[in-house]
Image (cartoon, rainbow, N blue to C red):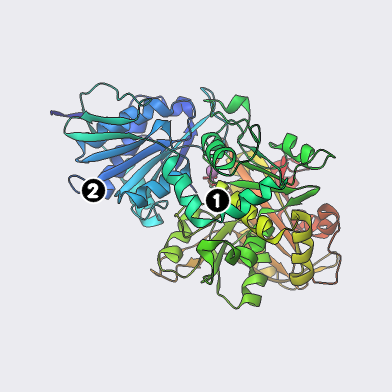
Amino acid sequence: TKILTVPTTPFEGQAPGTSGLRKKVKIFQQPGYAENFIQSVFDVVKPESGAVLVIGGDGRFHNRTVIQQAIRMAAANGYGRVLVGQGGILSTPAASHVIRKYGASGGLILSASHNPGGPEEDFGIKYNIGNGGPAPENVTDAVLARTKVIDRWLTVEAPDVDLDEQGRAHVGEMIVDVIDPVRDYADLMEELFDFDAIRKAVASGFTMRMDSMSAVTGPYAHEILEKRLGFAAGTVVNGTPLEDFGGHHPDPNLIHARELYDLMMSDDAPDLGAASDGDGDRNLIIGRGRFITPSDSLAMLAANIQIAPAYRGRLAGIARSMPTSGAADRVAQELDVPLYETPTGWKFFGNLLDAGKVTICGEESAGTGSDHVREKDGLWAVLLWLNILAVRGISVDDLAREHWARFGRNYYARHDYEGIATESANALMKELTAKLSSLPGATLGPLTVREADSFSYTDPVDESVSANQGIRVLFEDGSRIVFRLSGTGTQGATLRVYLERFEPRFGHLDAETAAMLEHQVAAAEAIAGIARHTGRSAPDVIT
Ligand code: VG1
Ligand code: CO
């Protein structure tokens, strides 16, 4: 087959952020935009001839277009075989699993995760390496450098592959296998968890609602929860992936999954409420009358993970991102396993998981996962919760109360200021950084600053250093405020302020979070001048 060399010039701003390149669809629709980025990836990873590449996405608008482009470019760049999910669908954790299972050299995941989709909304491309995980910083840095000098991309002349039929096609010399996006993943879940125990609980009346938010987990949830585990038809709602997610943000939090929350707080609540995001890597867990913060979920799952068959007798360690609450730290301490604190973004867990240093990882942003793949995994977290609840015969609320009574409770909230001017956000962070050394000893209401720094991480496996990963202000009473700017937005800047306060066992374990964090909220304003810099008197989103 003839390889076509298409001349191009660099586009500005193709830096992969926290989780890949994310931009408005309109930007991706510029001729050569996606091609430049994909070619930059291929130029950096230099696939061996015959290498296998996995391609799939969350089904959002523009997914199919980029998949066809990527398939032709893969053929021109020497790949021997592409595995693509039927309909162009692969959830992020399923893609991670497929990469690992079939020994692929890597994969392209097309998603902007929890960001809205549609012609006026967001799209994204992320490259995962052969371990199934997001490319580490040395790769994403090299990709960015390449996007700045790229002058050509390679493709072949070939018709579009029929993505809707499973089976084999050829593009040039390259094989394209359109695979069942669900089966491998569902089989893996069945290996990890005690499906019999869950089925028994379901048969004796355990109920749940899974809100797939018209995003990618629908087909997975229908297969696993309704077909394999026996939950009633209708347990999965919004279970068909739509190109625009029905016009909603597929973000499983208390704002965007409000209907689920309201149901779970009502008299009609099932035993468990869960939701997942656009690409299926996040999870929301709500018990009857009890919302579980993602940070608490990580801690509660870590404390109970050995109930699940695949994890019996093996909890090597726990990892959490820096802004995630210290609830998991207390579990690690009590169970006498190491706790690792990493920068935000799943890519920082990859080395720890590969080295066998940790078994479970999590982020405050509703991401939880384990060493079964190298991505966070929404349905996995739901299934682990189900496994634990089924075996223990306990409600979510009782499990939470029991957990806090044993470990104490980390009250926690994240305040997001979205779409603020980039200059204002940068000025705020700059001013904050400049005053770090003067903060220790300062008093803010009843709080006294013990320590303040800019978080820098040294990877314990390869010793690579990632600096400037967020500002931490730690207080004498053990409470904490973290400030950082989002790396996944597509419009202006988003300031995230993470607030946390620890209440020991026998303390106020069932208070209102907002009331418990009042002093921390006031201190954050006093320290950072949020209103002065952003003109906002309140956050846009509290999670
Ligand atoms: C956010 C979250 C982070 C998560 C990332 C990708 O990043 O805070 O914890 O790993 O999204 O998740 P940021 O830089 O905007 O804070 V996903 O589900 O969007 O792939
Ligand atoms: Co996601």
Q: Note whether residue 291 is visible.
A: yes
Q: Position of residue 104 (x, y in %)?
A: 30, 48
- Mark before the other along the chain sequence, 1 or 2: 2
Q: Position of residue 349 (x, y in %)?
A: 48, 60
- In the picture, the quarter occupied by the N terminus is top left
Q: Which mark is residue 380?
A: 1
Q: Amino acid at mark 1?
A: Trp
Q: Quadrant of residue 226?
A: top right
Q: Note whether residue 113 is visible.
A: no
- In front: 515, or 535? 515
| Some atom of ligand 1 lies within 8 Å of the CB belonging to the residue at label 2 | no
Disc 2 packing (10 Å; few <14; some 14–19; many ≥20) = few
Q: Which mark is residue 249?
A: none
Q: Position of residue 210 (x, y in %)?
A: 65, 39
Q: Amino acid at mark 2?
A: Lys
Could you tell whether 393 is left or right of 18 in the image?
Answer: right
Q: Secondary structure at mark 2?
A: loop
Q: Secondary structure at mark 1?
A: helix
Disc 1 packing (10 Å; few <14; some 14–19; many ≥20) = many
Q: Which mark is residue 46?
A: 2
Ligand 2, seen in the image, is in the quarter at: top right
Residue sticking out furthest to the bottom: 336
- In front: 29, or 83? 83
Q: Position of residue 353 (x, y in %)?
A: 45, 63
Residue sticking out furthest to the left: 2
